[in-house]
Image (cartoon, grey):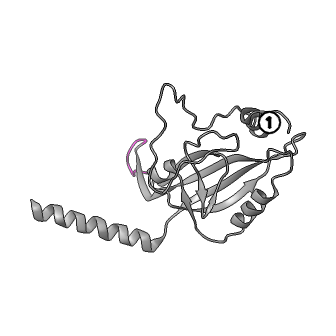
Amino acid sequence: MAEYTINELYKQAFGEDANPYRVDTERVDPAPVTEGEPRRDDWLGRNIQMPFNLGTFSFPDEPLIQLSFRRQVVSKNVAGGRGSVVDEIINDGYYQLRIRGIFVNDNDVYPIEDMLTLRAILSIRGAIPVTNLICRVMGIRQIIIIGANFPDMPDIAGAQAFEILAKQTTDVELELIEQLEQKTTLQRVLNVI
């Protein structure tokens, strides 16, 4: 197997160094294990701090996850006002995700199985459940994949970089259940007072 580090692979694929979610475990305790997110090791045997799953597929190494939030706002000039503008929030918005990672085989053989699985995920024409700590914290349970890129990895036979572009989506049935639960909780609180 050729000698290279994950940072070298990320630098070649994406033009920047990457050390995804690593902590110095001698100085900081690793993140606690949470239900539904068992501890796993990456391809180098290091503990994965923030596992990422799309549907039932667990990514073999930690991808970098970039979130951006977008709310739809309409600005209107106020009649008679001098430079006065009223901003109206049209909807609460949604998150866009940019998921970047690298599939690596330690024997310099192209990671065909991981790429075929990713291809199957990309072909799904609907919402895909996502399991990840940062996504859960931000309320992202499902995504719709908008597109994907596969940067070339010259001179590295056993690796393939990928970038997935996705958008948060909601399950209307799940959203209605959550609203009902919030309403029930509020009624209980008001009955106590």
Front in this rendered view, residue 154 or 157: 157
Amino acid bearing label 1: Gln
The residue range painted magenta reads 75-83
The residue lying at 37 percent from left, 71 percent from top is: 177
Relative height, residue 2 to residue 152 (above, below): above
Give coordinates of residue 115: x percent, y percent: 77, 58
In which quadrant is the N terminus drawn? Answer: top right
Q: To which residue does mark 1 refer?
A: 12
Give coordinates of residue 39: x percent, y percent: 54, 48
Extreme residue toward the right, this view: 155
Front in this rendered view, residue 100 or 22: 22
Extreme residue toward the front, this view: 45
Give coordinates of residue 78: x percent, y percent: 40, 50
What kind of element bears circle 1?
helix
Mark 1 Cα shell of 10 Å, populated few (<14), some (14-19), many (≥20): some
In which quadrant is the C terminus drawn? Answer: bottom left
Front in this rendered view, residue 88 or 47: 47
Please identify the dominant SS of the magenta region: loop
The residue lying at 48 percent from left, 57 percent from top is: 36
